[in-house]
Image (cartoon, rainbow, N blue to C red):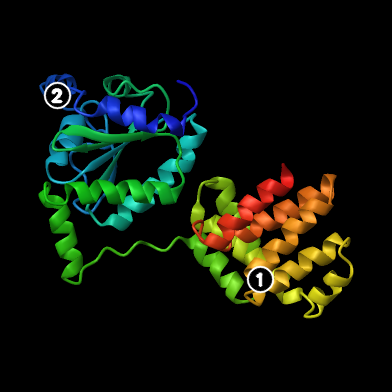
Amino acid sequence: MTRPNPRQSAALSAALSGAVDLSGLKAKADAVSRQPAPSAAPAGGGEQPAGDFVFAVTEASFQTDVVERSMQVPVIVDLWAEWCGPCKQLSPVLERLAQAAGGSWVLATVDVDTNPRIAQLFGVQSIPTIVAIAGGQPIDAFAGALPEPEIRKWLDSLLDALRDKLPGIRVAEQGATAGEPYEEPEDPRFTAAEDAFEQGDYDAAEAAYQEILDAEPANADAKAALAQVRFTARAEAADPSSVAAADSDPDNVEAQLTAADAQIAANQVEAAFTRLVDTVRRTFGEDRDRVRQHLVGLFELFPSDDPRVAAARRNLASALF
């Protein structure tokens, strides 16, 4: 299988929609069920605890755990393999989101190396591939380790479309309304990083968030938090007179970076962005790249749709090219 390409998502989704016949795996599962039962139940079999929203699936258990269960709630099928690097980034995110969803959807993981018929059924050409099953049929899909915000949007759209069609979604939501919401378990990695940040140990907080990103490069929460930690550490060390000093010495790159941090801390966002864009125009080589990276890091402190960020990105592109 080839490396995943997120741009295949739309085409994959369209190809799966109404085009996959799950009866082949049903026949396979029926045949297996007529054989003597093994001494140990297969991982992901139909004997999962009621509160377990993440489970492994085999060819033998696919009919029960995926097809039949999808009559009640959406089943998100994660097709992965042990050797797949992007899978190791995506799967933990999906597992965390499934537990947080509290049963409004469930996650079925499929090792394609040990269950090739399932991969063949969906015509999988790259992994990770994620397929949403509802009402016994695939309804949507994407390929590649997408960023967590995009996955959340995809899931929200999926649940909105199915809310009046599958009873399990309504039951899960009613349980939350009745005062029994599923509380997402705290991630000890984030807890340690947040504790360090609150104590002013910015080096430890940065190291903790960086460790999360080393394991999950697409983790948007850790990326945003890391940017905040780095900025806070710089801003607290900045001299209040740094803006005046930078204005009097426009060719001093270090002074421009420090002044921009001070302006951001004073909520002079547009002025800080303009300062660094102008510095990019005046510099070359390593200095220019250093300023560019600093500015991009400041962008991470704001929502991606902030108009000030959008304008500054356009100005930066103009300055660079």
Observer-side mark, 1 or 2, equals 1
Tag 1's secondary structure? helix
Residue 296, image x and y in percent?
65, 54
Towards the viewer: 229 or 206: 229
Task: Indicate left or right for 124 with 27 as reference.
Answer: right
Label 1 amino acid?
Answer: Ile
Which label is found at residue 37? none
Badge 2: residue crowd in 10 Å (few <14, some 14–19, many ≥20): some
In the image, residue 274 sits, relative to residue 41, either above or below, namely: below
Residue 190, image x and y in percent?
51, 62
Task: Indicate left or right for 178 with 296 as reference.
Answer: left
Marks 1 and 2, Cα distance to the nearest angstrom? 59 Å
- Residue at 24% in and 66% down: 181
1 or 2: tag closer to the N-terminus:
2
Tag 2's secondary structure? helix
Residue 44, image x and y in percent?
26, 37
The residue tagged 2 is 26
Residue 234, image x and y in percent?
72, 69
Which label is found at residue 264? 1
Task: Indicate left or right for 288 with 92 as reference.
Answer: right
* Residue 130 visible, this angle: no
In the image, residue 250 sits, relative to residue 219, either above or below, namely: below
In the image, residue 236 sits, relative to residue 93, either above or below, namely: below
